[in-house]
Image (cartoon, rainbow, N blue to C red):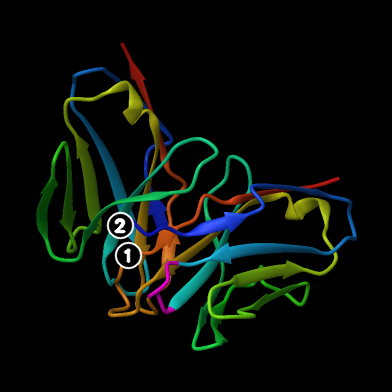
Amino acid sequence: EPEVTQTPSHQVTQMGQEVILRCVPISNHLYFYWYRQILGQKVEFLVSFYNNEISEKSEIFDDQFSVERPDGSNFTLKIRSTKLEDSAMYFCASRDGTAHTDTQYFGPGTRLTVL
Amino acid sequence: GQNIDQPTEMTATEGAIVQINCTYQTSGFNGLFWYQQHAGEAPTFLSYNVLDGLEEKGRFSSFLSRSKGYSYLLLKELQMKDSASYLCVVMDSNYQLIWGAGTKLIIKP
């Protein structure tokens, strides 16, 4: 069964460093998402992406964040200058785009630890 | 504002039945999802309701009442592996997912 994959599974970085989190959505899916979940808290929407551009973004997704689909398979989230409070699980999700209410399927997540 | 309420934690016994309730107030409604999330893992899809009534899928059932802004997830024949958080998630009028904080379900032998 197709699945969303993410790399790395765990990233440790120093405050102020740039990190790139990578995702490979399910191959025939058209909509891509990034979410984060701080330990013990609820899942928070960051950004949605369709047709090579951002379709929605939350207040969390400020100028420090960017997303890119550099090729036909990868979908990346870049944090330019990490802060301690960026420590969280980051989940990528995708859906096939037939209908807005299609189920979003989640990758296993990247645990980001900022020291 | 948008709000989803569900109990923080519930405890049940292996083999029993448990019902996890969710109430919501959102700007518009395009369906309600239930996701399961084991600690340290990604949410996995369980169910989707957009019309009133009960949807049954194996040991899991989900109910929706749009007029009451209410849903529940019913888990039967509980197994130890059902110990997880259960997330009530509403899709609003902009097709954005609004996430509840989750209900941590503890299964005891």
User: Disc 1 vs disc 2: Cβ atoms closer than 8 Å?
Assistant: yes
Q: Looking at the image, can residue B55 be seen?
A: yes
At x 74% / y 55%, what residue is drawn? Answer: A86
Residue tagged by mark 2? B33
Quadrant containing the C terminus of chain B in the rendered view: top left
Measured in 3D between alpha carbons, the distance from the residue under mark 1 to the one under mark 2, in whole angstroms, is 8 Å
Label 1 packing within 10 angstroms: few (<14), some (14-19), many (20+): some
At x 45% / y 37%, what residue is drawn? Answer: B38
Q: Amino acid at mark 1?
A: Thr
Which disc, if any, is residue A55? none
**Which chain does the residue under circle 2 lie in?**
B
* Rendered location of residue A90, percent (x, y): 61, 55
Residue tagged by mark 1? A103
Query: Left or right: A59 with respect to A56?
Result: right
Q: Nearer the viewer, residue B83 or A71?
A: A71
Q: Which element is circle 1 on?
A: loop
